[in-house]
Image: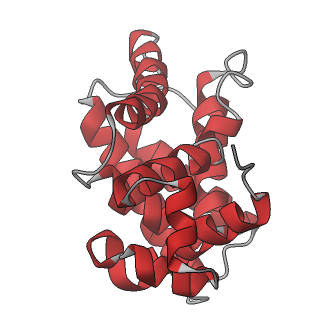
Amino acid sequence: MRTKDENKLMAIFDATVRLTATVGIAGLKMSLIAKEAEIAAGTIYLYYKNKKDLLNAVYKNLKSEGIFSVMGKIEHLPIQVQLFRLWEVAFEYHVANNNKAVFIEQFELSPLISLENKTLEEDSMSYLHKTLEEAKKKGIVKPIDNDIIIALILGFMKHLAARATKEVIDANEEVKHLCYAMCWNAIRENDNE
């Protein structure tokens, strides 16, 4: 059996992520990915049986980054600090890895996502849901539906990150803390700090 060439795998992953930002998931073709990766079209099929297989492998690889890198390491912190750390890591990831963030967002909405990868997405969201439920029980966060809170926080964070990526705003530490404080003030119970 032939061993996998890690350099070719990375070239394929990188090409897939870059192309998604320009042509979208639907516009991806294996031949286009091969051309972008500067490898023979047939080489991709040595590693992946089809586009769905490749996209799921890329997604699984990317999901180990970002907030997954801090989940489980921050549970001991106060809830407000946990939420800030999740927001901060997600924001910094989106700014530093805009193409990866675009790939993840598009792929999570794609019918090509595998059951295994849907579970990965649910795991990351369940951590956030659990944290918000705990915060509500303690009277720290307003008793608003979690999906509304998450849409507010993530929607704002993604838009802010996109603006920072395009250098429309300077997302320095002061701005980052101000923006998180705006989110926090929107969801926190008023009698808490």
Is 161 in front, or is 33?
33
At 63% from the left edge and 30% from the top edge, which residue is drawn? Answer: 82
Residue 84 placement (x, y as % from top left): 62, 41
Placement of 6 over or under 74, stated as above or below: below
Residue 34 placement (x, y as % from top left): 53, 79
Residue lying at the far front in this picture: please name it: 1
Q: How many marks?
A: 0
Is 25 in front, or is 142?
25
Residue 160 placement (x, y as % from top left): 50, 70
Asked if residue 190 can be seen in this view, the reply is: no
Asked if residue 151 can be seen in this view, the reply is: yes
Residue 113 placement (x, y as % from top left): 32, 46
Q: Which quarter of the figure is the N terminus placed in?
A: top right
Residue 149 falls left or right of residue 173: left
At 45% from the left edge and 26% from the top edge, which residue is drawn? Answer: 123
Placement of 146 over or under 60, stated as above or below: above
Q: Which quarter of the figure is the C terminus placed in?
A: top right
Is 80 in front, or is 159?
159
At 49% from the left edge and 43% from the top edge, which residue is drawn? Answer: 184
Is 36 in front, or is 21?
36
Which color scheme did the rendering employ for the protein?
A: secondary structure
At 52% from the left edge and 48% from the top edge, which residue is drawn? Answer: 57
> Looking at the rendering, which quadrant does residue 164 occupy?
bottom right
> Looking at the rendering, which quadrant does residue 51 occupy?
bottom left
